[in-house]
Image (tube, rainbow, N blue to C red):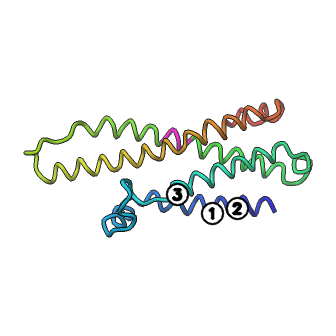
Amino acid sequence: GIMTLLDALRQSFEFAQDFNVRVDLRKTLKRLGFMKEMKQLPGLLKQEREALACTMKILFKVQHDTRIQDGELADEAAERLLRTIDLILGNYVTKEQLLQEQADATGGEPTPTAGGAAMAAYREREVAAQETEREVLGLVPIVSEVVLRGLRDLQHEQFARHAPRL
């Protein structure tokens, strides 16, 4: 039941994440006219975020369900919770660091006399920075409203048991 649902959400997340990291493919789709009315590149960021958020909400609810906590799925649910928290926080930190590196590397816009190659390279860096910023901004509510709130609402014993791994 519930583990099957969590597996489906994980597959949805992984599919979206695999697509989203293929920035060259997304640029090609945009260049060929797919979703041309959008400013940003086509992507599955919402699917990625929603799968993570839904997974976390379910896993935190499971931590409060005595039927599951007293059963054979308790350890598996706790392990999935910790792995997913680790994934989310790791992604957030990595993308935030990348965003800072991109901001440091972008520099100013090239002068009009700099040439087409310099302008194209600048635009590429700008697109990459915008995509990274979108990803970071999408993770903020998951971290603050789902992960931190869920950790806050755990029973003291559960939090104490999980805290060393966080």
Up-down: is 155 above or below 24?
above
- Which residue matches tag 1? 11
Total tally of numbered discs in the picture:
3
Q: What element carries label 1?
A: helix
Left or right of 5? Residue 26 is left
Instruction: State the image coordinates of residue 131 (x, y, percent, origin top left).
Output: 40, 49
- Which residue matches tag 3? 17
Magenta highlight on residue 78: no
Is disc 2 surrounded by few (<14), some (14 to 19) or many (20+) residues within 10 Å? few
**Label 1 vs label 2: CA separation?**
6 Å
Amino acid under disc 2: Asp
Q: Is mark 2 on a helix, strand or loop?
A: helix
- Which residue matches tag 2? 7
The answer to whether the residue labelled 1 contacts the one labelled 2, judged by CB atoms less than 8 Å apart, is yes
Report the span colored magenta: 90-94
Which quarter of the figure is the C terminus placed in? top right
Instruction: State the image coordinates of residue 64 (x, y, percent, origin top left).
Output: 84, 42
Amino acid under disc 1: Gln
Left or right of 150? Residue 33 is left
The answer to whether the residue labelled 2 contacts the one labelled 3, judged by CB atoms less than 8 Å apart, is no
Amino acid under disc 3: Gln
Which residue does the image show at 46% across and 38% down from the upper left? 96
The answer to whether the residue labelled 1 contacts the one labelled 3, judged by CB atoms less than 8 Å apart, is no
Instruction: State the image coordinates of residue 72 (x, y, percent, origin top left).
Output: 88, 54
